[in-house]
Image (cartoon, rainbow, N blue to C red):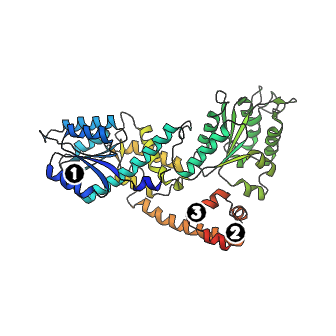
Amino acid sequence: MLTEKDRVEKHKLLVIEDDDTLRAQMQWALAEEYEVLPADGPEAAIQALLAAQPHLVTLDLGLAPNTSDSSAGFRLLGKILQQSPLAKVIVVTGNAQRDLAMKAISQGAHDFMAKPVDVGELKIILKRASYIHSLESEQARLQRSGEGRDFEEILGMSSGIQGVFSTIRKVASTDVPVLVTGESGTGKELIARAIHNGSLRKSRPFVPINCGAIPEALLESELFGHERGAFTGAHAQRSGRIEMAQGGTLFLDEIAELPLALQVKVLRFLQDHKLERVGGRGAINMDVRVVAAANKCLKKLVAEGRFREDLYYRLAVVSIEVPPLRERDDDIVLLAKAFLKKYSNERARAKALSAQAVDTIKAYNWPGNVRELENRVRRAVTFAEGPLVRPSDLGFGPLDEASQNLDLKKAKEDLELKFVQMAIIKHNGNISKAAEELGLSRPTVHHIIKKYNMLESVRKG
């Protein structure tokens, strides 16, 4: 997670410019926000790069002695990225050299701007680049320390997702059942797989089943298997998903959709560690760990009589609540860049996010969470006509859909604040009772309290 110190600490900026006057002007104009390291050519630039490891670089592609030839600038770009892969390089070109800027971005440059240099515009570009450098540097630190490894494709350094990582590490080596909750698209199956891959069962099967995607009439057979002749069409004995997971992990996705009649049978399996195939007469001993997931509040369903309370407590020995993407501000750009790298190939034109695309994805509310972000980036790789992904490539229309969502987000936040305040006051500050009435978990309510600085309301309650 980014600390306040990380956000305010000056980043090192290497300014590579052979025009003495322009270099001095840039150094003077940017010195307040950055630790500026001036360089008049490739040799001085490499020395500064090795000595100071700058976070940001501005690079004039037309370096002396032949300012009309960009080959020296491109060679230097390659050396910079080889030496400091996380450095954000902003190339500076003439107005008529946009094709060179696009080529530089395809070779790893972060962004570009045209001469004459507009300092105000440059400051905006550098601010965005500095922000992304902070995200990627922190993620790299977590990877080196082991805090971000072994979690499949789950990326992130926000406090919410780091809490999820911490719980995964604690429960993976045990055999306790785990309930993963969160909105659709937050990556609940990835978390279940991370638990499995961190356990002693990792060499055995991980078997998922979506309880909401299989017709009720077939679900029992799909879970428990059946004997030959158990029903019309059962021409041979068949193992169910539970049996397939022997020695490994069974992932019960959308567990809230499990019919009440089957809930009884699943509960019995969790209690006895035995199963009986449909039409069978003997119990089979099983060694299976169960991880379940739900995008609905199971406690609310229990109160409504739609989910068995005893099954809920059997499944939720440990609960992991996955935060929605809109609560993971520091992770959104990081994930978008990771998906862009994942889906880009030699034939794909898109190699980087434009500044406008970064602003758009940061402003958008992401109702479909990580799944929606991944799908939009995948779409962008297909539709982009150049090396930079634009908002339109991501499927955001000309009416500035992201800005419209900001208004919707504000309306939603106002309603959220009002209802949580009402519930807390009604229950005299009892967070558990307020969360139960709202159909939310205690951690979610605590997050909302902190988000809106509602501690005073809680005290009054």
From mark 1 to mark 3, how far is it between C-alphas?
Answer: 44 Å
**Which callout, 1 or 3, points to the residue nearer the camera?**
3
How many C-alpha atoms fall within 10 Å of the one at disc 1: few (<14), some, or many (≥20)? Answer: some
**Residue that badge 1 annotates:** 114
* Residue at far top of view: 236
Type of the residue with mark 3 = Lys
Disc 3 to disc 2: CB gap under 8 Å: no
Q: Quadrant of the C terminus?
A: bottom right
Helix, strand or loop status at disc 3? helix
Quadrant of res 299: bottom right
* Residue at far left of view: 65
Helix, strand or loop status at disc 2? loop
Disc 1 to disc 2: CB gap under 8 Å: no
- In the image shown, does 381 or 410 lie closer to the viewer? 410
- Residue at image coords 56%, 38%: 151
- Residue at image coords 70%, 65%: 434
Left or right of 373: which side holds 13? left
**Residue that badge 3 annotates:** 450
From mark 1 to mark 2, how far is it between C-alphas?
Answer: 57 Å
**Which callout, 1 or 2, points to the residue nearer the camera?**
2
Left or right of 126: which side holds 71? left
Left or right of 269: which side holds 200? left
- In the image shown, does 7 or 349 lie closer to the viewer? 7
Residue 403: image x %, image y %?
A: 43, 62
Residue 97: image x %, image y %?
A: 19, 45
Q: Earlier in the sequence, mark 3 or mark 2?
A: 2
- Residue at image coords 74%, 30%: 243
**Residue that badge 2 annotates:** 429
